[in-house]
Image (spheres, rainbow, N blue to C red):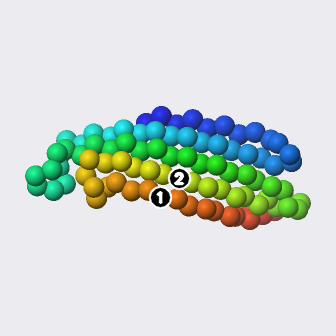
């Protein structure tokens, strides 16, 4: 697995970007008659965090994960939006 991420400040917000790649090879098979499972996964994370008050931030994040697998059951595409309010005291 390879993962790279970066974070920076711009326009008064904290931005983040992450990218990951994974290759997995399995010794066995999940179903009779199939070839041994091999997966290739790509993950992308993009986020922005804004200050909304003293000790409070609002974070908006998007995650995208795509898995390509030799076993169709494990081939999928997943997307998620996240909005979070964080308070510190």
Q: Using the numbered discs, state the Cα–Cα distance from disc 2 to disc 1 in whole angstroms.
A: 6 Å
Quarter-of-image position of residue 85: bottom right
The reply, left or right, for residue 60 in relation to residue 71 is right
Quarter-of-image position of residue 76: bottom left
Q: Which element is circle 2 on?
A: strand
Disc tally is 2
Q: Which residue is pictured at 44% across the width and 50% down the height?
A: 66
Quick one: quadrant of the N terminus?
A: top left
Quick one: quadrant of the C terminus?
A: bottom right
Name above or below for residue 27 compared with residue 80.
above
Tell me whether circle 2 and circle 1 mark residues in contact (CB < 8 Å). Answer: yes
Q: Which residue is pictured at 27% across the width and 39% down the height?
A: 25
Who is closer to the viewer here, 57 or 69?
Answer: 69
Name above or below for residue 44 compared with residue 86.
above
Who is closer to the viewer here, 20 or 89?
Answer: 20
Residue 3 on image: x %, y % = 52, 37
Q: Which element is circle 1 on?
A: strand
Residue 68 on image: x %, y % = 36, 48
Q: Which residue is pictured at 24% across the width and 43% down the height?
A: 26
Disc number placed over residue 24 in the picture, else none? none
Q: Is residue 76 something that shows in the picture?
A: yes
The reply, left or right, for residue 70 in relation to residue 85 is left
Q: Residue furthest right?
A: 54
The reply, left or right, for residue 85 in relation to residue 76 is right
Q: Which residue is pictured at 41% across the width and 39% down the height?
A: 22
Disc number placed over residue 64 in the picture, else none? 2
Residue 7 on image: x %, y % = 71, 40
Mark 1 neighbour class, 10 Å CA radius: few under 14, some 14 to 19, many 20 or more: few
Residue 48 on image: x %, y % = 73, 52
Q: Which mark is first along the chain, 1 or 2?
A: 2
Pointer 1: what residue? 78
């Amino acid at each position: 697995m390879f993962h790279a991420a970066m974070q920076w400040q711009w326009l008064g917000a904290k931005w983040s970007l992450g990218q990951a790649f994974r290759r997995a090879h399995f010794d066995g098979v999940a179903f009779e008659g199939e070839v041994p499972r091999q997966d290739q996964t790509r993950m992308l994370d993009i986020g922005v965090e804004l200050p909304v008050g003293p000790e409070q931030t609002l974070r908006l994040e998007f995650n995208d994960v795509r898995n390509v697998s030799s076993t169709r059951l494990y081939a999928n595409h997943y997307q998620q939006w996240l909005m979070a309010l964080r308070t510190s005291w």
